[in-house]
Image (spheres, rainbow, N blue to C red):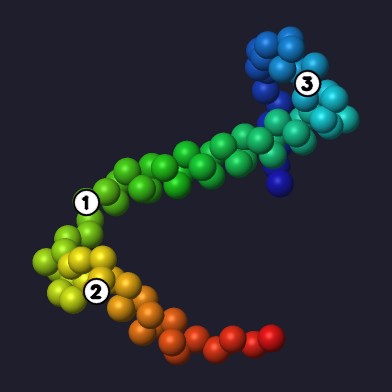
């Protein structure tokens, strides 16, 4: 993966804490930012899809009991190995 050097300013106490958790601050910050970016992408996708489900578009799944029955039917076909 190509890397780019950046300069950021962080609170001193945060840097001190990070140093106690990892000897490599760059990797530590990169992992944390990667996780943060993934979380933000998921949140944005959820916001963008909010309201996409319409009960009238899914007859038979309009209330909780119908949804539970549907899930039971799907799961009944699953095999449990073990």
**How many other residues sit within 10 Å of disc 1, few (<14), some (14-19) or many (≥20)?**
few
The residue labelled by disc 1 is 51
Residue corresponding to mark 2? 66
Q: Residue furthest right?
A: 23
Task: Describe residue 45's horizontal placement relative to residue 18 as left or right.
Answer: left
Real-space Cα separation, disc 2 to disc 3, in angstroms: 50 Å
Q: Is residue 78 left or right of residue 74?
A: right
Q: Nearer the viewer, residue 31 or 58?
A: 58
Mark 1 or 3, nearer chain start = 3
Secondary structure at numbered mark 2 = helix
User: In percent of the image, x 60 and y 41: which residue is there?
Assistant: 35
Q: Which tag is nearer the camera, tag 2 or tag 3?
A: 2
Question: Is 3 placed above or below 70 here?
Answer: above
Left or right: residue 66 compared with residue 57? right
Identity of the residue drawn at 85% across and 25% down: 20
Crowd tier of the residue under label 2, counting other residues whose Cα lies within 10 Å: few below 14, some 14–19, many 20 or above = few
Can residue 71 be seen here? The reply is: yes
Above or below, 14 relative to 57: above
């Amino acid at each position: 993966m190509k890397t780019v050097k950046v300069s950021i300013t962080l609170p001193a106490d945060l840097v001190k804490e990070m140093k106690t958790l990892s000897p490599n601050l760059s990797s530590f910050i990169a992992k944390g930012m990667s996780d943060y970016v993934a979380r933000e992408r998921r949140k944005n996708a959820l916001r963008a899809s909010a309201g996409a489900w319409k009960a009238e578009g899914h007859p038979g799944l309009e209330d909780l009991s119908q949804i539970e029955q549907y899930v039971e039917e799907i799961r009944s076909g699953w095999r449990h190995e073990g």
